[in-house]
Image (tube, rainbow, N blue to C red):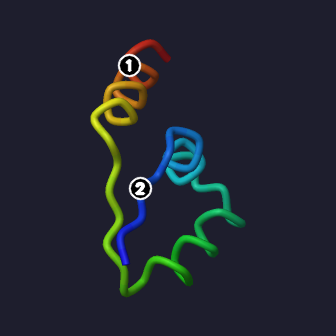
């Protein structure tokens, strides 16, 4: 199954929010996970301006 992650989930994963990381590990273990170009840009811009 393919999952598309949004900006909020990627941010939580980057911040290592324990609840989100555990859920991510259990659900997405055998599945394909992708982010859109928009999410990539938003995360990249957010990291740059921190």
Q: Is residue 36 left or right of residue 12?
A: left
**Classed neighbour count for the residue bearing mark 2: other residues with Cα under 10 Å, few (<14), some (14–19), many (≥20):** few
Q: Is residue 37 left or right of residue 15?
A: left
Q: Secondary structure at mark 2?
A: strand
Residue occupying image coordinates x 46% and y 22%: 46
- Which is nearer the eye, 35 or 15? 35
Q: Which mark is residue 18?
A: none
Disc nearest the viewer among 1 and 2 = 2
Query: Mark 1 or mark 2: which comes first in sequence?
Result: 2
Circle 2 residue: 4
Residue occupying image coordinates x 51% and y 38%: 7
Circle 1 residue: 45
Residue occupying image coordinates x 44% and y 12%: 49
Q: Position of residue 18 (x, y in %)?
A: 68, 64
Would you place residue 27 above or below residue 3 in this image?
A: below
Q: Is residue 34 left or right of residue 11?
A: left
Would you place residue 26 above or below residue 40 in this image?
A: below
Q: Quadrant of residue 44?
A: top left
**Classed neighbour count for the residue bearing mark 1: other residues with Cα under 10 Å, few (<14), some (14–19), many (≥20):** few
Q: Position of residue 13 (x, y in %)?
A: 53, 54
């Amino acid at each position: 199954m393919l999952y598309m992650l949004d900006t909020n989930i990627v941010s939580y994963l980057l911040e290592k929010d324990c609840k989100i990381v555990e859920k991510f590990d259990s659900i997405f273990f055998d599945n394909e996970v992708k982010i859109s170009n928009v999410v990539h840009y938003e995360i990249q811009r957010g990291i740059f301006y921190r």
